[in-house]
Image: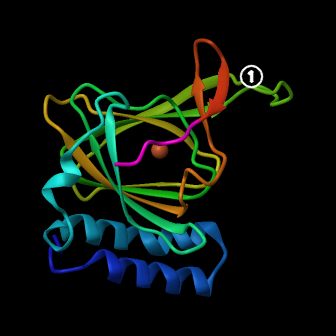
Amino acid sequence: MDTSAYSIAQLAGDLREICAQTKDEREILSRARPLARRVALAKGSWLKPHMYEGDAEQGFGVHLLHEEPDHTLAIFAVSWLPGRGTPPHDHGTWALVAGVDGPEMNRFFERVDDRTRPGHAELKKIGEKVYGVGEVLAMPTGGIHNVWNETDKVTLSLHIYGKHINFTGRSQFDPEKQTETPFVLKLA
Ligand SMILES: [Fe+2]
């Protein structure tokens, strides 16, 4: 494991360089993926105790570490309270999530409705995977997942988005009620 120093500022600089060289989302994800792993394993360079604080109402704590002036290249530390998580959601941009402390369950979904009724969405579960420390989930724009901390300790992961996800107009979904509604995060 490469646990040598790698700061959030270095990561942001490397991401800026990648995004200046290509607009191809698949290429951005494949080139940024090893950087996400590297920064997750180099947590000594950036992780602070307050980033473990979660929001009891929301179920998780969102700590902004970096964004560009136009809200692109947003980097967050997200802490997950035990037994808590998110509803299924999309991001409205590409996403990389790297495990930093503890395993996190991800369930993946796809839309199966025809998207013609505003506020209505039907989801089908297509898979699940637990991501551990140093493992990286890469999701293209349009990917839908939810995250759950199934452990009895706070877990923490590093999230990188093409754009700050409170500025992409992204959605959360209720598979039972078959609804799609805006999903805006409360930041710490
Ligand atoms: Fe997500």
- Does residue 103 appear anywhere in the picture? yes
Is 58 placed left or right of 162 in the picture? Answer: left
**Span highlighted in magenta in the image:** 183-188
Q: Position of residue 22 (x, y in %)?
A: 63, 81
Q: How many marks?
A: 1
Q: Where is the N terminus found, in terms of image quarters?
A: bottom left
Report the predominant secondary structure element of the magenta stretch: loop
Q: How is the image coloured?
A: rainbow
Viewer-side residue, 84 vs 126:
84
Is 13 placed left or right of 89 in the picture? Answer: left
- Does residue 101 appear anywhere in the picture? no
Q: Position of residue 11 (x, y in %)?
A: 36, 78
Q: Tell me which residue sits at (47%, 69%) in the image.
A: 67
The quarter holding residue 8 reads bottom left
Q: Tell me which residue sits at (81%, 27%) in the image.
A: 118
The quarter holding residue 27 reads bottom right
Q: Tell me which residue sits at (66%, 76%) in the image.
A: 23
Q: Label 1: few (<14), some or many (≥20) within 10 Å?
A: some
Q: Position of residue 19 (x, y in %)?
A: 57, 79
Viewer-side residue, 175 vs 51:
51
Q: Tell me which residue sits at (66%, 17%) in the image.
A: 178
Q: Position of residue 59 (x, y in %)?
A: 33, 31
Q: Residue furthest right?
A: 116
Asked if residue 115 lies in the magenta stretch, the reply is no
SS assignment at label 1: loop
Q: Which residue is mark 1?
A: 120
Q: Is residue 149 positioned above or below 174 on the image?
A: below
The quarter holding residue 117 reads top right
Viewer-side residue, 20 vs 114:
20
Q: Is residue 64 positioned above or below 111 on the image?
A: below
Viewer-side residue, 86 vs 113:
86
Identity of the amino acid at label 1?
Answer: His
